């Protein structure tokens, strides 16, 4: 079992736009309108979800607990965003608000999970199988994320 230290999510930072013709060197992520989270998977079938400031919020999102089994026994530290989707499948922050802050009332969180289910959109893998990947290029971390989340749909998980 691997215990990872607290790592803050990698947040967007302002910068200059790429020079004309340099678009191939850039990538963009869509803002999801959710709650940013770090998902700690020690490799023993358990998981811990922390908010961007390090507060544990695992019990507020019981439908995400199956993520640990979905990625197998490989320890990982994943960066993502918890979202609630509208009827068209788009993230809806107003729907998510009813789910935020329920980590101290897991029974209420479980009841709301039936009517306002959440998903986690994964952006990055910070550590995998005991290796720190944070110094690796984003493209390599992205490849590791896509393979580490199989057989679940790459980059997105919600329990069946």
Image: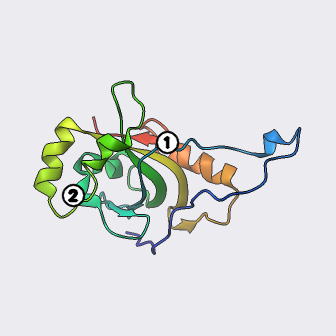
Seen in the picture, residue 106 relative to 84 is either above or below; the reply is below
The percent position of residue 113, horizontal first and vertical second, equals 20, 43
Instruction: Out of 39 and 51, give the one closest to the viewer.
Output: 51
Quarter of the image for the C terminus: give it.
Answer: top left
Could you say which disc has been placed on residue 67 in the image?
none
Could you say which disc has been placed on residue 102 in the image?
2
What whole-number distance in Å separates the C-alpha atoms at marks 1 and 2?
25 Å
Instruction: Out of 63 and 150, give the one closest to the viewer.
Output: 63
Which residue: 27% across, 51% down? 65
Residue 112: which quarter of the image? Answer: top left
Is disc 2 surrounded by few (<14), some (14 to 19) or many (20+) residues within 10 Å?
A: some
70 displayed left or right of 59: right
The mark tally for this picture is: 2
Is disc 1 surrounded by few (<14), some (14 to 19) or many (20+) residues within 10 Å?
A: some
Q: Are marks 1 and 2 in contact (CB under 8 Å)?
A: no
SS for tag 2?
Answer: loop
Which residue: 45% across, 35% down? 153
Could you say which disc has been placed on residue 155 in the image?
1
Query: Which mark is in front, 1 or 2?
Result: 2
Instruction: Out of 88 and 126, give the one closest to the viewer.
Output: 88
Residue 55: which quarter of the image? Answer: bottom left
52 displayed left or right of 158: right
Which residue: 62% across, 46% down? 143
């Amino acid at each position: 079992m691997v215990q990872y230290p607290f790592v803050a999510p990698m947040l967007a930072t302002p910068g200059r736009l790429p020079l004309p013709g340099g678009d191939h060197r850039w990538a963009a992520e869509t803002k999801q309108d959710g709650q940013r989270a770090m998902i700690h998977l020690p490799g023993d079938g358990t998981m811990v979800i922390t908010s961007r400031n390090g507060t544990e919020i695992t019990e507020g999102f019981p439908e995400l607990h199956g993520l640990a089994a979905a990625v197998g026994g490989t320890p990982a530290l994943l960066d993502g965003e918890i979202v609630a989707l509208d009827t068209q499948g788009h993230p809806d922050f107003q729907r998510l608000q009813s789910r935020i802050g329920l980590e101290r009332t897991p029974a209420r969180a479980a009841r709301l999970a039936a009517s306002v289910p959440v998903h986690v959109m994964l952006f990055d893998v910070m550590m995998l199988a005991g290796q720190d990947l944070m110094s690796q290029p984003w493209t390599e971390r992205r490849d590791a994320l896509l393979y580490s989340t199989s057989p679940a749909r790459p980059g997105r998980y919600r329990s069946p």
